[in-house]
């Protein structure tokens, strides 16, 4: 990796109904506005309130 380049991933998880998708969507928009490339993935294991939900975002200066 060249100096100054970066590539990282972050994950947010919790119970369905806690609003996990909202902060993930806000962060994704911020990264895009900064000119970064990203891949976001939502995993809905349960659509019933209280089930698990995960959001993973990978961000890099190069296409991911």
Image: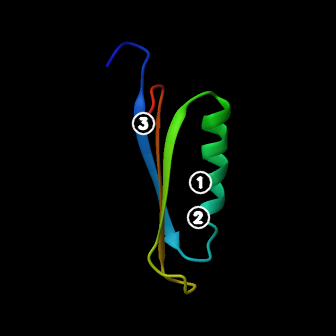
For marks 1 and 3, give the one nearer the viewer.
3
Identify the residue shown where x is 56% and y is 30%.
36
Please say if 2 is above or below 61: above
Q: Earlier in the sequence, mark 1 or mark 3?
A: 1
Q: Residue furthest left?
A: 1
Colour scheme of the picture: rainbow
Q: Badge 2 is on which residue? A: 20
Q: Are marks 1 and 2 in contact (CB under 8 Å)?
A: yes
Q: Residues under labels 1 and 2: Cα distance?
A: 7 Å
User: What is the quadrant of residue 33 in the picture?
Assistant: top right
Please say if 6 is above or below 26: above
Identify the residue shown where x is 55% and y is 87%.
48
Please say if 3 is above or below 36: above
- Local crowd at mark 3 within 10 Å, few (<14), some, or many (≥20)? few
In the rendered structure, the answer to whether residue 30 lies left or right of residue 5 reads: right
Identify the residue shown where x is 45% and y is 47%.
10
Quarter holding the N terminus is top left
**SS at mark 2?**
loop
**SS at mark 1?**
helix
Q: Position of residue 26 (x, y in %)?
A: 67, 49
Q: Position of residue 32 (x, y in %)?
A: 62, 36
Q: Badge 3 is on which residue? A: 64
User: What is the quadrant of residue 4 in the picture?
Assistant: top left
**SS at mark 3?**
loop
Disc marking residue 9: none
Q: Residue furthest bottom?
A: 48
């Amino acid at each position: 990796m060249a100096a100054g380049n970066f590539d990282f991933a972050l994950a947010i998880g919790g119970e369905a109904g806690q609003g996990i998708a909202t902060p993930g969507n806000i962060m994704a928009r911020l990264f895009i506005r900064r000119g970064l490339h990203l891949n976001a993935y939502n995993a809905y294991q349960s659509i019933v309130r209280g089930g698990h939900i995960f959001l993973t975002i990978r961000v890099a200066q190069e296409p991911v």
